[in-house]
Amino acid sequence: MTSLLTVRGIVKTFPGVRALDGVDLDVAAGEVHCLLGQNGAGKSTLIKVLAGAHQPDAGELTWAGRPVTFPGPHAADAAGIATIHQELDLVPGLSVAENVVLGHEPSRLGFTRFRDAEALTRGLLLRLGHPEIPPRREVGRLSAAGQQVVSVARALARDARLIVMDEPTAVLDPNEVRNLFRVVGELTADGVAVVYISHRLEEIRAIGDRVTVLKDGATVARDLPARTTPTAEVIRLMTGRPVEHAIPPPSAPPGEEVVLEVEDLAGPGFGGVSFTVRAGEVVGLAGLVGSGRSEIVETVYGARRATAGTVRVRGRALRTGSVPAAVRAGMGLCPEERKSQGLLLHESVARNVSLAALGRFARAGFLGPDAESDAARAVLARLDVRPADPSRPVRTLSGGNQQKVVLARWLLRGGRVLLLDEPTRGVDVGARGEIYALVRQLAEQGVAVVVVSSEIPEVLGLADTVLVVREGRVVRTAPAAELDEGRVLDLVMGAAHV
Amino acid sequence: TSNAAPAPGGGATAAAGGDNAEPGKPVTIGFSCPAADHGWIAAIAANARNQAGLYPDVTFEAVNPTTDIAQQIAAVDTLITKEVSALVILPNDGSQLTALGRKATDAGIPVINLDRVFDSPLAYRTWIGGDNYGMGVAAGTHIGEQLKAKGVGNPVIGEIAGIDNLPLTQARSKGFADALSSYGYSVGPRQAADFTAQGGQRVAANLLQAAPRLDALWNHDDDQGIGVLAAIQQAGRGEFLMVGGAGSANAMRAIKADNTVLKATVTYSPSMASSAVALARLVAQNRGMGDLVEKEVPTSLTLASATITKDNVDTYLPLGFES
Amino acid sequence: MSEQTTGRAPAESAAGAAGAGVTGPRAGGAARDAGPSPWGRLFLGGVGHNLGLVAVLALLAVVGVATADTFATTANLLTILTSASIIGVITVGATFVIIGGGIDLSVGKLMALASVWATTVATQSFGPWVMVFCALAVGAAGGLVNGLLIAYGRIVPFIVTLAMLISAQGLAERISGRRSQIVTDPAIAAIATTRVLGIPLLVYLFAAVVAVGWVVLNRTTFGRRTFAIGGNPEAARLAGLDVRRHTAALYVVSGLCCGVAAIMIASLTTTGSSTHGTLYELDAIAAVIIGGTLLSGGRGTLIGSILGVLVFTTITNLFVLNNLDTDVQNIAKGAIIVAAVLVQARARRATP
Amino acid sequence: MSEQTTGRAPAESAAGAAGAGVTGPRAGGAARDAGPSPWGRLFLGGVGHNLGLVAVLALLAVVGVATADTFATTANLLTILTSASIIGVITVGATFVIIGGGIDLSVGKLMALASVWATTVATQSFGPWVMVFCALAVGAAGGLVNGLLIAYGRIVPFIVTLAMLISAQGLAERISGRRSQIVTDPAIAAIATTRVLGIPLLVYLFAAVVAVGWVVLNRTTFGRRTFAIGGNPEAARLAGLDVRRHTAALYVVSGLCCGVAAIMIASLTTTGSSTHGTLYELDAIAAVIIGGTLLSGGRGTLIGSILGVLVFTTITNLFVLNNLDTDVQNIAKGAIIVAAVLVQARARRATP
Ligand SMILES: Nc1ncnc2c1ncn2[C@@H]1O[C@H](COP(=O)(O)OP(=O)(O)OP(=O)(O)O)[C@@H](O)[C@H]1O
Ligand SMILES: Nc1ncnc2c1ncn2[C@@H]1O[C@H](COP(=O)(O)OP(=O)(O)OP(=O)(O)O)[C@@H](O)[C@H]1O
Ligand SMILES: [Mg+2]
Ligand SMILES: [Mg+2]
């Protein structure tokens, strides 16, 4: 196989961090090359080097047989590398079409030719199976999934020879993932190379040709065959240890006491939602991206105002639209968007963990010096957050560990109801297993848990009871044991797909 | 125009009479005034410096002008610490510098309070300043006379004041209203600007809309008057008579040329700064005023406000300050 | 969208998201997005977003007609427009800077400096074109210094432009000797007095700057990239834009607007003076924000900013026509501003 | 951390991320955080982050000693501290508001209003305690109105506090009849003249407000929540904090500081006046930002703000001692501010 891109010995340090420590990678034209690694392994940093967004400290890039350097994003782009970055790289105030052409606007005398841009965009969206996204819509008004589609369209617009995709499927539902894979197939058939990053190992198997594994900023395995390498082997390479990645089964049936009762809850985008959660029970909400599951749990939590319905915790109705009331009643929420809704990125881990339980560490409002440090340390140890240093700025933690910090916040507060919205999005296999174990552990201690997830196996594996949500309605409530993946998929897609 | 280098002191230095011109014991005179981007204030500072330059026995110590009360307090404090022989102070705000005047007086330094008066006579040795109320009276009287002569009944008389916050503005307006009432007239549209050409233009442009017909207009300040005149020209109005205030060279030239609505201005001359320095010298040297019998300088001098028209403008032109 | 008026008001983003008008990719929003032509749509968008402000203006007009006979006269309406023209031109520049994620506190004093420099005896002796060139050059140079320090020196815009405000003020005082410099050139003076078809030249100039600004902001690559740089600078960089150069250019645009405004104010007041433009920075920013531009950048309309300017100017006009005292004027002005924003926010929430 | 000084400067987040000077996750963070005692660490953190500012102050002191004999005298240093005291107290409040993600433009005129209200003949007739109470109540009430409109009315802070600035100015003029109201009460007047151990009472008052502010910001749940709300209001809300009530409270804190400052300025100038505090808003915000607080909230130190105030006051003092003209002062001041921020940014980048 002739190599389109060869990467040798790339080193990239940020002050005090060696994010990349000698990475090798070979990508051939027409292949899907998967890049695997734990959170913080350096995958995104590597692709930023490829995109010209970071300058490597050492190492060589060879592009189409010639050594190159990319002093800026422009250079990589000119060479024919397009990148879909992990953090959405769109401008919310511009239209879909403007985002797609940003940096390469068709123009005459400085005037943008909107019609050309829109025609191009319309074509790309059609190709991606989303003709319904209007090119003139402001990107900020699209759902996360819609924005991801636009990001993909952007990359396709460049007619690149190599397209790098950094976790493009994290916010996509199965249907859209299938669409994306079809497009990837078309691209590779045309000889375009794709570098593909995902934490969902089954996807690697579905579209990958070869796999390169990164660990702690270095390549630990190269060019493994994607389809035939055993999963356990891949995981061992990534984590350096064998990891149990299956979801542990519940060890005891849930208790009898009803902790959370939701009755006829309605809000903008959903309605008629009723369910109960008993102590120690895990209730899962399955559904497509955009089906309104986040709205439901956020309304239960009081973060959005309900238009109708009641929420009771242990028999007592909550004031609607008040998060403090819900928290006082013992609820906690790990929100969908870790960074924008969950974390104080500037602050230390300890301060993030103690945020909801600050009052406990204060006397008459006064906090002792780092009063909460010890308590935080204990919770972090229990969750096995690495590194277990509570004074470290939270933004320096990997995605999985950041997710654990948000969980730790509610563990420290010690409530009776925990709402988890996409708890494993963007989290690597290792951390995923730990989060599953933690959910089990909490349930065993009598906490009522609600889990929202777009991964159907995850919902089925974790939940005792599953609610299937479609377009804001609960279309089926059943014990998990009575459902299987195919059934749920049919339900979430609706009659048209059955 | 103002672009000509400013005539030194606008020619406003006192011809020393009697034996006062004779050199006395050497004295240091401290001087502090506000910083304003305003022709009148600029003339005050220049006049003081020029007057001091006339005396071989005077060392002139001016602190940098400022608009900030706290800065002026700090600056004058340094002069007190230096133990100057006398202080000439034009405060940003009379009330707010009273305590400082007391401090200087208590330290044995005579204070000549220029224009904006301190709250307590204990804070100064002598006050010299313009007559704001009298200025309003002069303007009102001139307008009253002119309108009466024309036989206008029920005239619409406008007023564009300076900064309403200042006591001097309030005094001017009161004098104006009082004088007009003696003719049976009253002030119609009245708005305050801010002593800047821009403020004058803005307020005048709107005020001319409020009054589709005007018979007379008094503008308190010739500096902002530049903007007022511009607005009048832009609106194409000319049916009324305008009177200015303070007595800038620019306004006097316009009066002399007699081709705008500005027909007169009432003075509030920055020459008072020259006089203040002269007084400070005498006080510091323990001398009286030459033409007076008194052995001491009086405790207060109020300057008269003259009305300048086409007829007498030539006499006053040398005193006019550049905008 | 409510976030435009409420900006950083906390707790609100979520509440806003819960409100109406949320359209997912598969929702039926397509109808609304299929406007007439792109041009018409964009322009209507500018007004549509600002229906609240139009309502506020209408309300002020009603009050004007009710309280002052002369309010609804052509002469008075032209006076309002003329008064709005100078701060309006400055606001055009400020809109670019703020949409691009910056802030410019130096506008008023940059204008003052340009007006002073353009009206020195020396400059005036070269005639009107040199005066105009001088004003534009001084404005652009000031803006360039701002832009370079912000984009390449990496100092926050607030500090850089505040420092520029202070220094420009000092320089203007120094050059003018703190006196008002009279404009002797008849051509410059004529800008404020000339009328074409009964409308003052200044108003045409204002309209021209707004039109050019609108076209640049909405129809050119430069304008659209300004939104990108303000809305997500990192995304803009990854897309290959030269974010720094663009940022610097935005401050030059603002400085150029100050230069144009300098000529206008020199003509209107027949002087160049260091006292010109005092507090214009707050007025301009307030107009931009009331007009619905996010102070954090990335979103906004020029039409909104201009409506904001008109609201402010109309308020002042109303006060003078009704011969109110300055103190009462101020008390009322504060209340009216808050009321206007509330009305506008409500109108925005009502229309999706 | 470059983002502290460079804030929203576009291009910079990108440049910062790409270029030097960004402190990485595994960076010295741990080393820096492992200070001596937690208390000492926190305090040193405040200074440490601001080593650049300390250097700037030292530099100014060197210039002072070199150019003016009297600079290094106790009397002059006390003059600097006294001059700093009033704007310093206001800056304490402004620091809370800005760390909490807001901005308060009304501080100067809220102080003026409180000073006027506290020195009316009627208020003075009740004696000094009532005067103090009145000033604090007026300041707090003004802050409360700001806070309610921002937190519950969901109007951007810039507009609300600008409107408050304008209205408070009008109200102060109205109440005082535009005159400076003399303080006749000897107890209030004594605040500015009394010295304890040779140090003016005003300086103690300033120190006390800073100390209380520091403790509240760093050692109480209120302070901790202020950082949270400014850093990520949505996360704070979802963690169960009452973001609105807290936001409103921040403006009350700022208003209270204005009340304290009102008593101080009434004592220092022996008057209550509507002219007090002009442009204090820009000075206070500039001091806070120079002190390293992010204008977008969530990060900052009180010590930095106070150092910022001292830098500004020292610059002014130097100018007065050297008897510079205001125009030269201004030109130089702008340049010094930019230089100071550059020095500080460099110092920050050097220390991880
Ligand atoms: N701009 C930056 N400054 C400092 N450190 C950085 C920066 N970007 C990344 N890092 C650090 O470099 C390391 C590698 O991060 P990277 O984002 O490449 O990991 P990743 O493999 O993409 O992880 P994930 O699966 O969570 O996306 C991490 O420790 C990260 O914190
Ligand atoms: N802040 C917001 N602004 C605009 N639209 C929003 C916002 N939040 C949600 N929506 C819209 O509401 C709909 C429901 O989205 P939501 O994310 O709650 O669904 P979900 O079932 O939780 O899906 P997901 O798997 O993405 O969490 C989507 O179509 C989305 O576009
Ligand atoms: Mg990554
Ligand atoms: Mg969701």
Image (cartoon, coloured by chain):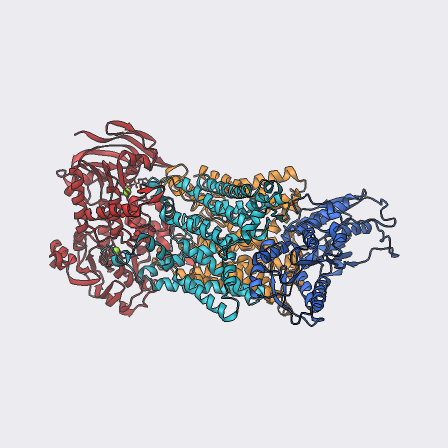
Chain colours: A red, B blue, C cyan, D orange
Count of residue discs: 0
Farthest residue in the front direction? C197
The quarter of the rendered structure image containing the N terminus of chain C is bottom left
Query: Based on the displayed image, in which of its 4 quarters is residue B300 positioned?
Result: bottom right
Side of A470 where A317 appears, left or right: right
Q: Residue at x 41, y 39 (%)?
A: C245
The spot of residue D196 in percent (x, y) is 65, 54
Nearer to me, A203 or D279: D279
Q: Is residue C160 left or right of residue B199?
A: left
Q: Is residue C157 visible?
A: yes
Residue A492 to residue D75: above or below:
below
Q: Is residue B309 above or below residue A80?
A: below
Question: Could you say where residue A346 lies in the image, as x and y percent from the top left?
Answer: 39, 48
- D81 or C141, which lies in front? C141
Q: What is the x, y in percent for residue A398?
A: 30, 44
Q: Is A339 on the left or on the right of D221, as rendered?
A: left
Height in image: A257 above or below A489? Answer: below
Image quadrant where one finds the C terminus of chain C: bottom left
Q: Position of residue A200 (x, y in %)?
A: 20, 45
- For the question of whether residue D317 can be seen, the reply is no
Q: Residue furthest top?
A: A66
Give whichever of A409, C332 is nearer the camera.
Answer: C332
Quarter of the rendered image showing ligand 3: top left
